[in-house]
Amino acid sequence: MDQDKPGLQENSHLDGDTADKVVDRPAIEQSRFSRRRFLHTSAAISPVLFSLKSHAGWGSGAGGQNCSIMVSGNASNPELCSNDAAGPHRWSQVIRSRKGDSTYPLRQALNNSRISGSTYFSQLFLTPFYHWQNLPMKGWKFKINVQQSGDVRIKHVLGAHGGGQFKLAIKLEPTESSSTGKGVNVVLRPRHFHQVLVTAYLNAFFSSSIIRYPYNTRQIESAVIEMIMVLASRLADELNNNSSVNEQSPAIKKSFHDLISQLQLWS
C-alpha cells in the first residue's frame, strides 16, 4: 500500500479517550464490524499488511470435502486441497450453484456465515463508514453518502457485466473547530473496484482450507478500511489546498489502483 498514510499514522498514536472521539459510531445491529474491532483495525494496521500469510482457522469448515471437485468441478482428481485463486466468473457459478452441484458445499459454507448472492457489497465492506469519522489534524470529518452511493448484490457484482460501474459517494464536512471550507460531496467511480473486492473476499474466505490465496477475510476488511481512510485523507488535503476536489486526481485514483493490484491474484 502507499506509504503516504497521514490519517492512519495520526490515528495510531491516539490514546483511548481521544480515539473514542475520533470514531464516534453508534452500534449497527447487522454490521460485520464491532466498534472495538473498527478501532483496532483502523488504528493499528501495519504497513506490511499484505506481506502476512493467512492463518489457520479462517477457512469455511469445508476442508473435509474434496476441494478439487468443488472448485474445478473435476471429480476425477482426488488430490488434496491446492487450488489457485478463482476469478469472478467461477465464484458466480459457486454462489448460484444448487444442491447436487460439485460446488454446492462451497455455497453452503458461505451461507453458514450469512454470505450469499443476495448479500450487498456495502454490507461486506462499507458499514464502518455509515457514520461520521474524523480526520485528525485535517479539519474535516467524512462518511459514506449511502443515498448517493451505488450498492449492488454480490451475485450481480460477480456477473458477466460486473454489476455496472461502482459509485462511491463520500461526504465531507468541516469539523466544529475548523473554519475552512464548506461541506462537499465527492462521487468517485472506480473501475473494477467492487468486483475485485468481492472476488478477493471469497478467495480469502477459503484461503486456509482449499484456496491458495495469501490473505484472509480480516485482512481484506482491514485493507478496505485503510484504503478509505487514506482516500478521505487525500480528499481533505485537496480541499485544504484547493478548496475543491479533482475526482480524476492521480492521487485519488492511486488509492483504488493500489488495492486492486494487491488483491487481484487470479488469472
Image (spheres, helix red, strand yellow):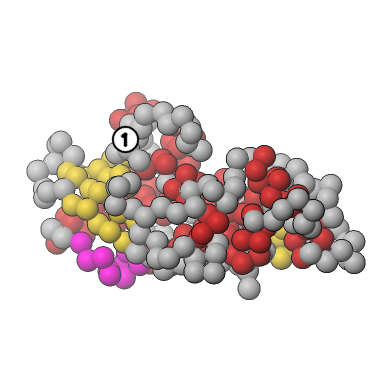
Can residue 145 be seen here?
yes
> Could you say where residue 143 lies in the image, as x and y percent from the top left?
30, 44
Q: Is residue 161 left or right of residue 165?
A: right
Q: Is residue 253 above or below residue 135?
A: below
Quick one: quadrant of the C terminus?
bottom right
Q: Is residue 65 above or below residue 238?
A: above
Tell me which residue sits at (55%, 62%) in the image. Answer: 158
Tell me which residue sits at (64%, 56%) in the image. Answer: 96
**Label 1: how many Cα within 10 Å (few below 14, some 14–19, many 20+):** some
Tell me which residue sits at (27%, 45%) in the image. Answer: 142
Tell me the residue that label 1 is attached to.
22
Q: Is residue 174 above or below residue 29?
A: below
Can residue 196 be seen here?
no
> Could you say where residue 247 lies in the image, as x and y percent from the top left?
26, 65
Query: Does residue 68 show up magenta in the picture?
Result: no
The mark tally for this picture is 1
Q: Residue furthest bottom?
A: 267
Q: At label 1, which amino acid type do we have?
A: Val
Tell me which residue sits at (35%, 41%) in the image. Answer: 130
Query: Does residue 249 show up magenta in the picture?
Result: yes
Q: Is residue 141 left or right of residue 242?
A: right
> Could you say where residue 172 lies in the image, as x and y percent from the top left?
23, 48
Element on which disc 1 rests: helix
Q: Is residue 57 left or right of residue 199?
A: right
> Could you say where residue 16 lies in the image, as x and y percent from the top left?
39, 28
Q: Residue furthest top?
A: 17
Q: Is residue 114 left or right of residue 133?
A: right
- Please give the range of residues in magenta: 245-253
Q: Is residue 18 above or below residue 55?
A: above
